[in-house]
Image (cartoon, grey):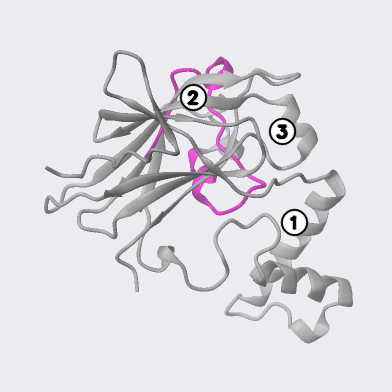
Amino acid sequence: MRFLFFFIFLTSIAFISGQNTVTLLPNLGIENNYSQSDFEYWKRATELFSKLNNLENEIKYSELTETETKAIDSLELGYGPQTDVIGCSWYCGGGPYKTSSSSVLNDDENYSNENIHDFDLFTGWVPQSKNGIGETISFHFKAKSPRINAIVIYNGYIKTKELWKKNSRAKKIKLKIDNETIAILELKDTTASQRFEIEPIQSTTENQDLVLTLEIMESYEGEKYTDLVISEINFDGIDVH
């Protein structure tokens, strides 16, 4: 067996009638409701942070304004649109090495599948199909890489709350491991992070990836657009540190 079957958490799943597939329910984090001014503030903060960490030292911390240093300090404390903590985490040793998708809206790189795993809530993957139904996003993990035990989804276009309302969001997602359907993820219609706990999985076959695929089954309709957006999908796991 290349992966272990999921342990059924009694408080977080419900069986689909007549099938062995289970529906997993999420544990919710805090909401991410950004205004246009919030977006501009945090975008500037992340740009400055990137320059501070540039090996060529484009700018110095001492040269920043009080507002700018406060924003950067907040990023380091875990606030703002970056989903992976600044410092050490499971991603120090784990994580997918590539993503692939069934489509990208108008083949526009601004909506690329790469956006779904860049740790930035201000970007997102947008597939081509109306409301995203039937579209897939896949994550490729190298053989024997650290095991995955959670999938964390940031649903919708979180860039601003206005855009989140206007665009469609995922409602139900089919979870597949190496093309085998394992569970249905039932998402809430919220800007909060949605963490789905799973039994640890990995590929144990030499030189053979584990491929985790998510297929959109149902969606929450946007107030204005039929484009579906998922801002970010991250993972957590074990075997690191």
Q: Which residue is mark 2?
A: 172
Front residue of 58/239: it is: 239
Q: Residue at x 49, y 48 (%)?
A: 117
Q: Secondary structure at mark 1?
A: helix
The mark lying in front, picked from 2 and 1, is 2
Specify the amino acid type for callout 3: Trp
The image quarter in which residue 239 lies:
bottom left
Q: Which residues are magenta?
A: 113-138
Specify the amino acid type for callout 1: Lys
Q: Position of residue 113 (x, y in %)?
A: 49, 39
Q: Is residue 220 left or right of residue 162?
A: left
Q: Dot 3 surroundings within 10 Å: few (below 14), some, or many (20 or more)?
A: many
> Which numbered disc flags the more N-terminal residue, 3 or 2?
3
> Which numbered disc flags the more N-terminal residue, 3 or 1?
1
Q: Position of residue 241 (x, y in %)?
A: 35, 74
Q: Residue at x 24, y 35 (%)?
A: 178
User: Disc 2, disc 1: CB below 8 Å?
Assistant: no
Q: Is residue 205 left or right of residue 137?
A: left
Specify the amino acid type for callout 2: Lys
> Which numbered disc flags the more N-terminal residue, 2 or 1?
1
Label disc, if present, on residue 164 of the rendered structure: 3
Q: CA distance from mark 3 to mark 2?
A: 17 Å
